[in-house]
Image (tube, grey):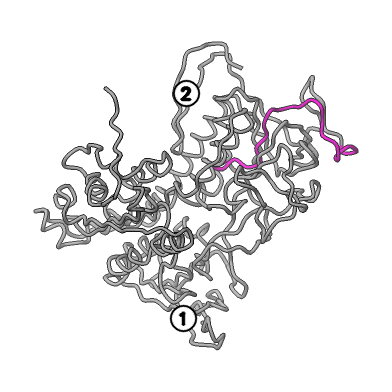
Amino acid sequence: MQSLISTSPISPSNPRSFDSFSSPTPFTLRFCGLRLQVLQSSHLKHRTINTTSKKTRNNVLAASPTSNGSPPTTFDYDLVIIGAGVGGHGAALHAVEKGLKTAIIEGDVIGGTCVNRGCVPSKALLAVSGRMRELQDEHHMKALGLQVSGAGYSRQAVADHASNLASKIRNNLTNSLKALGVDILTGFGSILGPQKVKYGLDNLITAKDIIIATGSVPFVPKGIEVDGKTVVTSDHALKLEFVPDWIAIVGSGYIGLEFSDVYTALGSEVTFIEALDQLMPGFDPEIGKLAQRVLINPRKIDYHTGVFATKITPSKDGKPVIIELTDAKTKEPKETLEVDAALIATGRAPFTRGLGLENINVETQRGFVPVDERMRVIDAKGNTVPHLYCIGDANGKLMLAHAASAQGISVVEQISGKDHVLNHLSVPAACFTHPEISMVGLTEPQAKEKAKKEKFKISVAKTSFKANTKALAENEGEGLAKLIYRPDTGEILGVHILGMHAADLIHEASNAIALGTRIQDIKFAVHAHPTLSEVLDELFKSAHVSVDEHKPVAV
């Protein structure tokens, strides 16, 4: 299913990234959504390990290639993290807070996919598309009493904005690791044996605990030839080297939908190619239908559903990109499209090859590293591998950057002696279109299935942005918030939002699920007026629960 995250492994031709204090004065670091208070020290030093050196650190035991099967008795580090993406970075910061001597290995650049080829540069492009869309909406401008004409853009300046933002955040992440005393080890990392890691050519280190945080790469189905120019993945598209007149986007999930927002705002016509029978199959169906009405139908977008792009040939010698479509059910050829460019947005595949997992008897499952609910790696016999964890896209539990960070923090809690299990149903997701879409927990069909299996009833409550004062003041009344819950207990099962700043609004619901807050309690929370947060306030207040066990907070 081309719109969904692929579970097929990928073998890239060019291996890429996996993804002591003396003063008690605290200072705060905020990078990529992570906040940490650390101790400031004028004597803080950062060590850089040369990948060509065969020496190990002084006064520590070096791992020996002849004893890979037995764990060491002393260690170079308390924690070594393979991969310096958002997940690895989050784990490293938390590890330092817990007093762990930490190193992070990176074979490419700090920040991984999210910062360099994903959520960060894409948000820069989406910021531009949002401004362009607003300036081009004459009716919207007139409704606000504004007159704007001749809105235009510089492609190179837009591309530079995305590139500069990625560079800035990457530098921030690197500096935060250095400031905390985390060793950044350059080179491709792999597991040599129990509690032993190799990086670069032949550098060996030992660690009491190891976290694999190697991330993912774009998944490209068979038959599609990517040239990086006219047939591209999101990695290439984020560079915005040109804006095609007509682009086909294979897959209508988060990635495809966001890029359709960018390209149509910049003047392109878009054609979606979706393997399933409906667009946006990963969304709650009601939200998906509204999204199609708001984000697809009014724009220069058409679509083909129920088809595979079985062969895509890049543009050559002035000829267009050729896309051969096949019926997803009958497997019969359907039609051929000729477009200026094609974006392959068929999900992502785990980057786990070359990790040396065979040295510890671990077999990947469709490329993913198998883990339990505590992110502990499971070997081929079904046993957990002592002191080895895997977080983020590489384990496939939830392929989101902030989920990887949360998993990393959870692992650090465990190795610090405090048991912790992350509730993945409390992790929110967002699609940064205009307007935005966000969600947390179960969709309505998923909730119905769970209710049937566990023999309870569900209820659904909805509120419209059209009833919100702030949304109307912004002339942005198009939107819906939907709550799925248990009326017998007040448990929140899922919340889905389409509307202005939906990506920001979802966190009240997300935190409620994470903390186990029930509707009968959260409906008494006070929201500032007039704000968009009142959309959630009205949503919770409109829910009807059969229990009234509100627990007032003592003052």
Residue 289 picture quarter: bottom left
Image disc number at residue 290: none
Image disc number at residue 338: 1
State which region is magenta. Answer: 65-87
Residue 220 picture quarter: bottom right
Coordinates of residue 304 in the picture (x, y in percent): 42, 79
Q: Say which of 166 and 301 sits in front.
A: 301
Give the Cα distance between marks 1 and 2.
55 Å
Q: Say which of 175 and 152 sits in front.
A: 175
Q: Which of marks 2 and 1 precedes in the sequence? A: 2
Q: Amino acid at mark 1?
A: Glu
Q: Is residue 9 within the magenta segment? A: no
Q: Say which of 368 and 378 sits in front.
A: 378
Coordinates of residue 52 in the picture (x, y in percent): 77, 36
- What secondary structure is marked by label 2? strand
Circle 2 is placed at which residue position?
37
